[in-house]
Every structure is written in C-alpha cells, then in structure tokens.
Amino acid sequence: MRAALGIRLKSGWASAVLMGAGEDTPTFLHRGHLLLADPSVPKSSQPYHSGFGRLQKDPEILERLTGVVYQAAMRSLSAFVNECRAKGHQPTAIALVVGSTIDPERIGNEHIRAHASEARLFRAALERAASDVDLPCVSTREADLRARVAHPPASRWAARIETLGQVAGRPWRADEKLAALAACASLGLR
C-alpha cells in the first residue's frame, strides 16, 4: 500500500497523520503529534516573540532558539517516521499544511511579523527534517488544499476523511483532518 504523511503545522507543534491508498481509497494508518519546540526551553515555541506584541531582534537569542526548533523538529519527525516503519508502513512523501506563506518582512505590525516569522521557521525546520529522513516534502497553504478538495474527484475522498475518526479514534480534530487530506492529495488519489 502506498503511504504518505500529512502534517498540519502549528506554533511549536504539529498534527501528523499517515494515510495509505489502495485502489484510490484513503486508509488511515497512524497518527501522532510532533513537537517542534523543546518544553524545557519555553521560549522555543515562540522564538520571535520578545514580549507581548514585540518582535525578538537579538540575533544571539534567535540563533539559539531556532537551533532548538531545528533539533526538536528533527527528533520528533524522525521518531514518528520510525514508529510508522515499525508498524510496517513506509511513507514515501510528506505534505505540510501551512496557514500562510507570506514573507514576514512584508508585514508592518511587529506582533503579526513575529507570528509569520515563526510559521516560516517551523515550516523550514520540518522541510529540513524531511530531507534528513530522505522523504520529499511539499508545503501547501490550507486555503489552497481546501479549494482543491472542494471539487470531484477529490471531494469523494475528502468526504471519507470526515468519517475516519471512527477508525483513528477520538478526538479527530480539524488539524488531523487537514493532515489526512494533505497526505491523500500527496498520494494523488482520484
């Protein structure tokens, strides 16, 4: 069975869902959460925030915290891929779902720029981690993914994703559904 990993990126963590496809039918295989920050380094979940509404500009602090993020992403993704493989599943690709791909430098408001910088950092950390585990990785904006699955034939398997909570177990939240949709899109289901 072909398998792909969908990941819905959040700030400091991500939902990961491994989906399989046999005869163009999506099949839930495994799920989990990826830590993209180190709980022992609280600022690593929001490294570009210097305080309420302020952007972190200290290059030494940013270098240390971004290093923590890259290490956490590698550890977490590698462990999850190894779990999948231990269960007999071989993911062949990773599909990241992101909220935005805007260039943070185009944002005037420091607080919003901090969020955009963190989104870019977490995406880059997962893309590098995917490369380190030898899996091709594609990032897709949530809005683009939703538009793609709104029309046949993708709408058929998108409807199936809604009911997979019965197989995956509760909770089956929007983040997991989006990750599963991205994985299915990566598998090229028709």
Image (cartoon, helix red, strand yellow):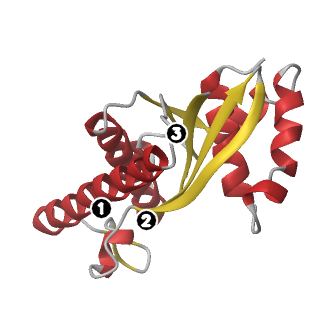
Residue closest to the eye, 163 or 14: 163
- Label annotation for residue 12: 2
* Residue 24, quarter of picture: top right
User: Is disc 2 surrounded by few (<14), some (14 to 19) or many (20+) residues within 10 Å?
Assistant: many
What SS does tag 1 mark?
Answer: helix
State which quadrant residue 110 falls in: bottom left
Circle 3 residue: 89
> Looking at the image, is mark 3 or mark 2 nearer the viewer?
3
Marks 2 and 1, how far apart at CA: 9 Å
Q: Residues within 10 Å of mark 3 (few under 14, many from 20)?
A: many
Residue 56 position in % (x across, y down):
27, 68
Instruction: Left or right? Give the position of 67 relative to 29.
Output: left
Q: Do residues under tags 3 and 2 come within 8 Å of each other at their CB atoms?
A: no
Q: Secondary structure at mark 3?
A: loop
Spatial separation of the CA atoms under disc 3 and disc 2 = 26 Å
Select label 2 or label 1 by which is in front: 1
Identify the mark at residue 72; answer none if there is no mark.
Answer: 1
Question: Which badge, 3 or 2, comes first in the chain's sequence?
Answer: 2
The amino acid beneath tag 2 is Gly
Q: Is residue 4 above or below residue 113?
A: above
> What amino acid type should be assigned to the residue bearing mark 1?
Ala
